[in-house]
Amino acid sequence: MNKSHLLPPNLTLFGYKICPYVLRVRYVLSLIELDHHYIELDVYANKPAQLLRYSPIGRVPTLIIDNEALCDSTVISLWLAQVYAEHQLLPANAWEKAKMMNDMAAIDSVHDAISQLISADDKSSFNAALTRFSSVFSAVLTLLRAPCSSPNSLVDVWAMVLAHLIRSVDTILQGMLSQHVPQIRSLPDIYRSRARASLRYQALLPQDYVTRLHNMMAHRNAYCAQLNNIALAEEEFA
């Protein structure tokens, strides 16, 4: 089967519902309205053999198509965008496409900084990660504040997932991120400017998303999970 033109009817996606990279792929699949089988993994259990067959290190998201697999949110999303070009997830113009992918890479840098932040095991590494987050976040702030040009664009997917993750981590840290980077307080605007996309994204989230995220951080014994007797109030969309 030529996978560049036609998808088989049986797609299987492995992931965690709280993983931002998995949420990206689930969001794209939702925008395309593509039927697929989703398998939720236990964060704390051994990876199933079916996943390890295609991704020996158990990487998620992993999307299985026939007897082959793709194991990266960017790779999967770009492939889907090209197969389903009629949904205009990417611009047709090569230069505009390159600029969008450049914006997506900038957002990836912020995700990396957040990962370092929530994985920091002591105050020194936490503060270093907080400084790096502040630096890379400023580079995407304009992008996050920009009106949504298309609720189906990949950069909108990237921006929505990032904005929600930042707000959730800030909730867990009782406003510590927004105290250090006050511009974070403007992020609720993204939900109003991208209302259609927001509702579709919200439908993918577990109701206890923030609690699950906190538990994951606590399980890692991360420094930030030990701060200030963290509250677990769930975030609501604006």
Image: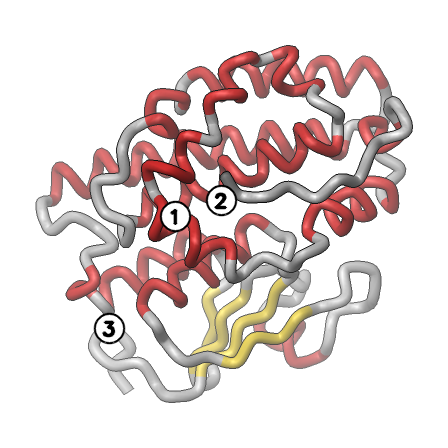
Residue 104 quadrant: top left
Q: Earlier in the sequence, mark 3 or mark 2?
A: 3
Left or right of 64, for residue 83: left
Question: Amino acid type of disc 1?
Answer: Val
Secondary structure, mark 2, is helix
Residue closest to the eye, 58 or 97 = 97
Discs 3/1, front = 1
Image spot of residue 8 (x, y percent)? 35, 86
Image spot of residue 47 (x, y percent)? 74, 69
Left or right of 107, for residue 117: right
Secondary structure, mark 3, is loop
Image spot of residue 235 (x, y percent)? 64, 41
Label 3 to label 2: alpha-carbon separation: 27 Å
Left or right of 3, for residue 189: right
Q: Earlier in the sequence, mark 3 or mark 1?
A: 3
* Whether residue 232 is situated above or below residue 42 in the rendered picture: above
Q: Which residue, given by chain and number where applicable, does mark 1 sit on?
A: 157
Residue 3 quadrant: bottom left
Q: Which residue, given by chain and number where applicable, does mark 3 sit on?
A: 4
Is the residue marked by circle 1 packed among few (<14), some (14-19), or many (20+) residues within 10 Å? many
* Whether residue 55 is situated above or below residue 176 in the rendered picture: below
Residue closest to the eye, 89 or 185 = 185
Q: Are marks 2 and 1 in contact (CB under 8 Å)?
A: yes
Give the number of the disc on residue 161. Answer: 2
Question: Amino acid type of disc 2?
Answer: Val
Secondary structure, mark 1, is helix
Is the residue marked by circle 2 packed among few (<14), some (14-19), or many (20+) residues within 10 Å? many
Residue closest to the eye, 214 or 136 = 214
Q: Which quadrant holds the N terminus?
A: bottom left
